[in-house]
Image (cartoon, rainbow, N blue to C red):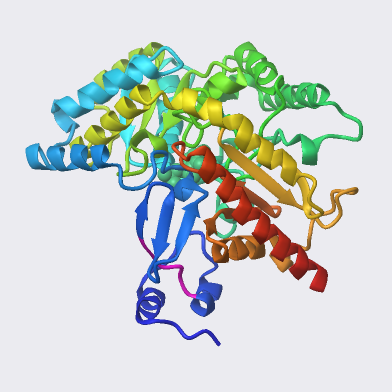
Amino acid sequence: MTVFGNQAVRDIETVLHPYTNLATHRDTGPLMLERGQGVFVYDTSGKDYIEGMSGLWCLSLGHGNEELIEAATAQLRKLSFAHLFNGKSHDPAIELAETLKALAPVPTSKVLFCNSGSEANDTQLKLVRYMNNALGRPSKKKIVARDKAYHGVTVASASLTGLAANHADFDLPIPGILRTACPHHYRGAQDGESEDEFATRLAAELEALIEAEGPETVAAFIAEPVMGAGGVVVPPASYFPKIQAVCDKYDLYVISDEVICGFGRTGKMFGCQALGFRPDSISVAKALSSAYIPIAAVTIPEQMYEAMLVESRKIGTFGHGFTYTGHPVASAVALKTLEIYAREKIVEQVAAKTPQFQGHLRRLADHPLVGNTRGLGLVGGIELVADKATKQGFDPKRGVAACCVRFAEEEGLIVRALASDTISVCPPLVISPAEIDEMFVRFDRALARTLEWVRKG
Ligand SMILES: Cc1ncc(COP(=O)(O)O)c(C=O)c1O
C-alpha cells in the first residue's frame, strides 16, 4: 500500500482532478510539482522532469519567462481589472485585438476574447446561430465536427468534441451536431487505400452527409488542423483542400480550432496555413499567453460582424461575453507573448528544430511496441500496438500507454497517454536541440521498460 505524504493526503481529501480516474487517484495520489524553469519542472523532492507536453500543449515559452512575469506585474499595478461590457474599453485589449487582426491567417473584422479554448468554441457555435438568424436562414444551424475531435468540455464544445468519455453520462452531445470521419490514415484507411484516396473518400462522405441532412440545414464545419487529444492525428496533405472544396460548395462557415496549433506549433504561425485551408474564423487560446494566464479569442469576419450588428440592434444588446473577456492583465501577457514570438522568430525556430524532433519520432517507429508515429513541427504522437503487422492494439484495460507514461515520469519526462494507447509529445517551443535529444533519451528508457513489462505479461 502506498504511504502518502501530508500534501498528497490533503490533495486526495480536497481537490477534484479533471481528466483523472477519480477512484484510482485515491490509491495512487498526485504527482506534486513545485517549481519550473525553462523546459524543466521539479517535484517536491527536487527531482527534475522535462515538460514534454508543455503542460497541456500550452506552455510555449517554458517556465519562468521574466518578461511575461514583468508584463503581468506591471499591468496588475496599473489597472488590475477592467471589463469590456457596456462599451467600456482599455488599451491592452485594443492593442491585443489589433495585433491578432494583423496576425490572423483570415480576413478579420473584430476579435472577441474569452478565457479558454472551450469558451472560444462554445462562442463559435453561438455566433454561427446568431449570424444565420440575422441572415434570415434560421434553419441553417447544424455544425459538422469530426470523430475524435477535441474542442473542449463546456456543453456546446463538449458536444463538438468527438470522444466518448466527454459525452458518456453527461447526456451529450446536444442536438444539431453532425459527425464526420477522423482523417487518421493509419487507422481509418481501407486496405491498399493511398493517403490521397482516403482523403477523397472522406470528402465524399462529408458531401453525402450534408446532402442527406439537407444543405439548407448545415451551417458550419469545425476542425483542428492537427488533432491533439484525439491522438495527434495529422491528416493527409490533400485532406483539407478537398474538405474545403465541399465546405465552399455548400456555403459552410469553416472554423479552424487553433487552440493547440496556433502560434508556431506546426512550423507555421497557424495550423491551417500548414495544412492548406482557409477558414472563416479561428479559435485561439493556450499559447496565446504561453499559458501564463487564461485568455482565448475568436476572430470575426466582416460578414459575421455585419450580421451581429443587425441582431444586436434588433435585440438591444449583443447578449454574450464573460466577466473576464479581454482581462487587462491577460491581454498584457498575451501581447508580450506575441511580441516575444515575433522578436525571437518562434516560427522559424520551430521549423529549424522540426527535422531533429520528427527524426526521433520516425526512429521510434522501429521499436517493437510502436505501430505508428506521426507529427508535424514540434508535436508528435506514438501509438503503441500489440502486433505491428496487424495493427492490433492492446486490451485498453491493460493501460499500456498509461504504464509507459508512468515509467517516463520515473525517468524524468512528462508525456501524456491519449486514447488508443497513443502517447503525445509536445514540448515548449523554446526547447533546445540538446534538450530534445535528452527528452527522447528519457523516452527511450521508458519505452524499454514498457516492453519488458508487456513481455512479463
Ligand atoms: C484543440 C483544442 N480545442 C479546445 C480545447 C479546450 O481548451 P480549454 O481546455 O482551454 O477549455 C483544447 C484543450 O486541450 C484543445 O486542444
Front residue (pair 350, 405): 350
Report the magenta stretch's main SS: loop
Region of the chain picked out in magenta, as a range:
29-34
Front residue (pair 308, 106): 106
- Residue found 34% across the figure and 17% down from its top: 101
Please state if 64 lies on the left or on the right of 172 as rendered.
Answer: left
Residue 157 visible in rendering:
no
Q: Quadrant of the C terminus?
A: bottom right
User: Is residue 132 shown above or below 86?
Assistant: above
Q: Quadrant of residue 178?
A: top right
Q: Quadrant of the N terminus?
A: bottom right
Q: Quadrant of residue 96?
A: top left
Front residue (pair 155, 130): 155
Please state if 45 lies on the left or on the right of 236 as rendered.
Answer: left
User: Residue 332's spot in the image, x, y percent?
Assistant: 22, 33
User: Is residue 70 shown above or below 339?
Assistant: below
- Residue found 39% across the figure and 28% down from its top: 298
User: Residue 373's spot in the image, x, y percent?
Assistant: 72, 42
User: Residue 400's spot in the image, x, y percent?
Assistant: 71, 63
Given the current orientation, which residue lies at the most extreme front position?
434
